[in-house]
Structures are given as C-alpha cells and as structure tokens.
Amino acid sequence: MCRSNGVTMSVSPMYVAVEPEAFQLRQFLDKLRGTLFPQGKDPESEHRIHITGSNASLSDVIDRANTFSMFAPKQLIICELSKAPTEKQEQQLLNYAENPSEQNTLVVILSKLDKRKKLYKSLKKQNALLELPKPKAYEMPGWATRICHERGWKISSRAAALLSEHIGDDLSRMASELEKLSLYVHPKQEIAEKDVLEMTVKTSGDHVFAFTDQVMEKKKKAALTSLHYLLASGTPALVLMGMLARHLRILIQTFEAIERKVPKAAMAQDIGVPPFTLARYETQCRGLRKKDCHRFLSRLQKLDRDLKSTGISPNLLIEQTVRSMAS
C-alpha cells in the first residue's frame, strides 16, 4: 500500500489506483513527479494514456513501460481505464506486476476492481495497490489541518471543524477554500474560526445563515423554503445538519453566558462569535429555552445516525427534522 501523506516518497515501479479520490490522486501524482523529475519533467518523460474500449489491449502501455527511453532517463506512464478491466486486461496487469520494469514507473487508474479477484489480492500483497478513498465527513477537519501543514499554514481546530461542516467531504473545494483563506489572513499565519465565518461561510452561505435563523425562530414556512433551495443548489444534508448543530451550541453558550452574567462587552468573545451576530443570538434565546436547544441537539444526533445508516433519502430525513424543530 502506498499513501501520499508525506512530503517525500519512495518510488515503486508500479501503482494501481482503484476509484481514487480526485484531489488525493492529483496530490500523489505531483509528489511522484517531484521525486522522479527533481529538475522538472520534459515532454518525453511523461505519457498519459486513456483506454475507453472494454476490449482494448494493455499491450502498448506495458510495452512502453518496458522500453528504455533514449530521451529521458526515467518515464512516468499514466494509464486510465474508463471501464472495469476485462479478464485479459487483469491478466496483463497481473503479469506485469509480477515482473515490472525498474527503469520506468507505471500508474494504472481503474474505475473498478473486484476485491475478490486474484489481481486485487496480488497487488495488495506486492504493495502496488494505491489506496486513495474518498474521506468520511468526520475525517475532514484532519484533512484541513494536514493540507495547511503541507503548505506552511496553520488552522485552529474550531476553524477546521467549521470549514468541514460547510464544505462537506469535497477535498478539492477544501484545498481551494484554504488557499483563499491563507491569502485573506496574510500576513497572519493561522486561520481562525472568525476568518472561516467571514470569508467562506458568509460569502457563500448567506442562505445557510438565514435558514438556521428561520429554524431557531420557528418560521417554519420560510425555513422549509430555504431548505428546499439549499438542497436544490447542491448543499449536502449533512452540511445543513452540521450548521444547525453549530447554531444550537452557540445558543447554549449564550444561555450560559447570560446565566453567568458575563458583561455585554465581553460576551461575544466569551461565546466565540463575531460581535455583530451577538444580538441575533440573544433575541433567539428569548424565544427558546436552554432545554429546547439540548433536545434539538439530541434530535440532530438521531438525524446523523439515520443519514448514515437507514438508506432513506437524506432530503426527506432533514425535512422531517426541520419541520419538527421549527413547529
């Protein structure tokens, strides 16, 4: 198994990636190129080949991998199959994996491969299987921290959590948003939660904030209209659930700050929200009880379990939850 989470990497003569996540694959290939071609690659050093027909042969690809180039000391051959490999193609890959060329590096990208097949088991045994699965939602804050570390930035744990709630499990978008945030906070070196609120959530998520406000203020018709708009626009149900949970946690912190009689001037900092949002949370607390917020959080925990385990439409599940909370 080869993982692409290091700055440097040892290079094997062959890698096979099955349904790789796009961002991680790009990251892996960039690091591979940097290791193979430290002085920069030339046109003769890399070849990318797409095989679209199910009966297409891998012979030309394997012949190229076995060929010594007179124009480049090493070659990187990237071959992508758009369909699951045929038995013939599997046998060709299996034969090459058992005796790969040390002169060049072959990366094969497969759209599908049965884990019960001999090829899969052989690749795994020979450490030729490149495993780059799509991350789970709970892994995204760790990915935010990792991307920042690799690029010389820093991000607070709360900022990473908020960004993950807003982005979902899209690593490419995560990297893009972190790039924008690093420019936004410059010359500071650390991205804070308020930066994510101001730069990422606020600029792309006004509808999300309006939606969570409408739910907490029990404006059911408006909340459902906003929910349908956000879902139709491609916002994942898990992201909306995360923003509702975050809003409830802030309201609970607001209740507790009021109970502790925290001075108004210090309350926003105590809760951890931008000062201009404090009045809105205080107003919403007057229309709710703290135990309501805890009850709603328990309802969202059940929604989280249902989203991940029942197979019922996520849109239907979150709509049922919003109807209950906003009634």
Image: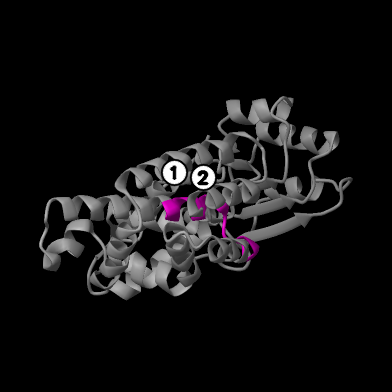
Stretch of the chain drawn in magenta: 231-244
| Between 302 and 93, the one nearer to me in the picture | 302
Residue 87 position within the rendered picture, expressed as x and y whole percent measured from the top left:
84, 33
Residue 320 position within the rendered picture, expressed as x and y whole percent measured from the top left:
59, 47
| Between 276 and 255, the one nearer to me in the picture | 255
Q: Is residue 277 left or right of residue 118?
A: left
Q: Amino acid at mark 2?
A: Pro
Residue 111 position within the rendered picture, expressed as x and y whole percent measured from the top left:
72, 46
Q: Which mark is residue 324?
A: none
Q: Circle 1 — which element?
A: helix
Colour pattern: one colour
Residue 77 position within the rendered picture, expressed as x and y whole percent measured from the top left:
65, 53
Q: Is residue 319 left or right of residue 288?
A: right
Q: Magenta span has 67?
A: no
| Between 191 and 131, the one nearer to me in the picture | 191
Residue located at (42% from left, 67% from top): 201
Q: Amino acid at mark 1?
A: Glu
Q: Are marks 1 and 2 in contact (CB under 8 Å)?
A: yes
| Between 19 and 53, the one nearer to me in the picture | 19
- Residue 104 seen in the figure: no
Q: Badge 1 is on which residue?
A: 139
Q: Badge 2 is on which residue?
A: 135
